[in-house]
Amino acid sequence: MKFKRVGWAKKSVIVQINKGFNFRIANFHPEQIYNGLIDFAAKYEIPISNPELFNFREIK
């Protein structure tokens, strides 16, 4: 999973799959979905890639 910005205020996630197409999740409401994705990745030991200066849990 790669967490990125789309524009100034929007967030997105790119989920990379070993076999198949990658897909992007962007502009979801409510924004707690992103925290759920981070928790899901931690639970199933899925590698997460996000910029060092950007922490999704701190931005509201």
Image (spheres, rainbow, N blue to C red):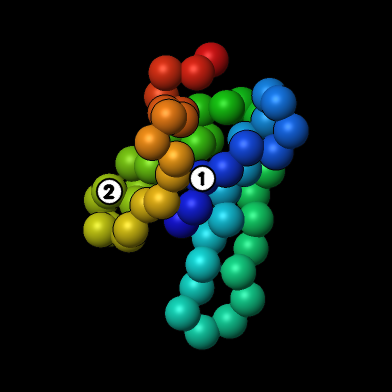
Give the crowd class for mark 2: few <14, some 14-19, many >=20 residues within 10 Å. Answer: few
Give the crowd class for mark 1: few <14, some 14-19, many >=20 residues within 10 Å. Answer: many
Query: Which numbered mark, 1 or 2, is in the foreground of this view?
Result: 1
Name the residue at 58% across, 81% down. Answer: 20
Name the residue at 44% across, 40% down. Answer: 51
Give the spatial CA distance, label 1 vs label 2.
14 Å
Q: Position of residue 15 (x, y in %)?
A: 53, 60
Quarter of the figure with residue 21: bottom right
User: Foreground residue, 40 or 55?
Assistant: 55
Badge 2 element: helix
Please state which amino acid type lies under the numbered disc 1. Answer: Phe
10 relative to 40 in the view: left or right: right
Q: Position of residue 24 (x, y in %)?
A: 65, 56
20 relative to 36 in the view: left or right: right
Quickly name the residue at label 1.
Answer: 3
Badge 1 element: strand
Please state which amino acid type lies under the numbered disc 2. Answer: Ala
Would residue 36 be visible to someone looking at this image?
no
Name the residue at 44% across, 44% down. Answer: 50
Determine which of the numbered discs, if any, sits on residue 42 in the image: 2
User: Foreground residue, 43 or 54?
Assistant: 54
Quarter of the figure with residue 23: bottom right
Name the residue at 38% across, 42% down. Answer: 38
Would residue 50 be visible to someone looking at this image?
yes
Q: Position of residue 49 (x, y in %)?
A: 41, 51
Determine which of the numbered discs, if any, sits on residue 48 in the image: none
User: Foreground residue, 49 or 29?
Assistant: 49
Q: Position of residue 42 (x, y in %)?
A: 27, 48
